[in-house]
Image: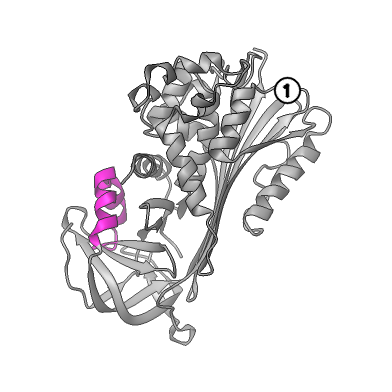
Amino acid sequence: MDVLSESLAKFTVDLHKQLVKNNKKNILISPVSISSAFCMVLLGAKGNTASQIEKVFHFPAVEESTLSPKNKRNLPEEMGCEPVNTNVCQANVVLQAMKQLLQELNQQSNLYELSAANRMYVKQDFELKEQFKQCTEELLNAKAEAVDFQKDPEKARTKINAWVESQTKDKIKELFASGTISGDTVLVLVNAVYFKGKWMEQFDKKATKDEPFHLNKNENKTVKMMYKSAKFHLGSLPDLKCKILELVYEGNFSMHIVLPDEIDGLEQLENDMTHDKLISVLYSTNVEQKVEVKLPKFKIEETYDLKETLSAMGMTDVFNSNADFSNISSQRGLQVSKVVHKSYADVNEEGTEAAAATGIIIKHILKAVPILLIEFTADHPFLFFIAHKPTKTIMFYGRVTSP
């Protein structure tokens, strides 16, 4: 795995562990969407603010990357100076990797639909440093658009939400709820990801039947259970007490179903999951065998306010008066006021449609061992994730406790 995909895997496990606390519901996140949005924040951050972002997202610090001394963390002091130092945009290996990943994800294919886009909306009279504008566009393809937050924040909110809807084929609506964008907003950073793929081995709709799904040892619910008998890649991780099924899409993507051995084994699986073990899951499905697969159809739509979650993970300065965003603008008193993440996934007989969006509001505040299986029946809570196979990048990650 390269530096970015490894960072994303570590962040995925950390964030999931935070979200499952006191939460028994379905979960769905897009690590790529959240990380891409915060790469824009990182470009504008300095000092301890930048260090906290790097730590939470497991990004290697700029000083640790393979740079010549003149291009290290002291360079952002020059941001905004003329002429623009183009080398600054090469200064972070993670940002370079994100640029390459976004380029790869946006390559056209007739086998699947995929897009990942960034955008910045800036208060009309708010002056961004030239270096920040250049680097966000060059590295993250995030163009800046001026909007009137002060006079008509509701119109600006509607405009931003409309962009997100168009980028996600109308699957992510109302990313920013009414009232979340106000007159003191100076900058909104947005990312949107969309994926639609068909199974290499599609399920026959006629074979889908009503069958029980065990919510726990004592409760069941009736779900639409899909069925397919074909050759699939299988694996097992005894340390995690789970079986893994890889469902391949046409093209460069696959979904991994991580099914606990026990009906009530999901909580222990989530507790025991680490970055290294998640990587093991990615590489564990190396045995292809004819298997009778039963998988419930499911649709997940979730919304998360990540401010408290990210603060608990160690990113505190960005949300308070200690925030140092002097690489964004010379104006002091900038801090992140809200981080919202919305996700969607529809898994059915034909394939999967999934989307996610992340929005960050910045305000001016005054003040593996293979085994042979005969049957794989996902009839109790499980983890799943969708990965981009060439880069081993986790695009979507979640759990199903109730289809």
Q: Is residue 328 visible?
A: yes
Closest to the observer, 295 or 138? 138
Residue identifier under label 1: 126
Q: Is residue 268 left or right of residue 61?
A: left
x and y percent of residue 241 in the render? 20, 57
Disc 1, SS = loop
Q: Is residue 197 left or right of residue 276?
A: right
**Disc 1 residue crowd, few under 14, some 14–19, many 20+, Cα 10 Å:** some
Q: Is residue 304 above or below residue 106?
A: above
Residue at position x 34%, y 39% from top?
3
Q: Amino acid at mark 1?
A: Phe
x and y percent of residue 283 in the render? 25, 57
What residue span does the magenta drawing correspond to? 259-284
Q: Is residue 91 above or below residue 21?
A: above
Residue at position x 52%, y 13% from top?
77
Q: Quadrant of residue 91?
A: top left
x and y percent of residue 88 in the render? 50, 24
Q: Is 269 covered by the magenta stretch?
A: yes
Residue at position x 55%, y 24% from top?
44
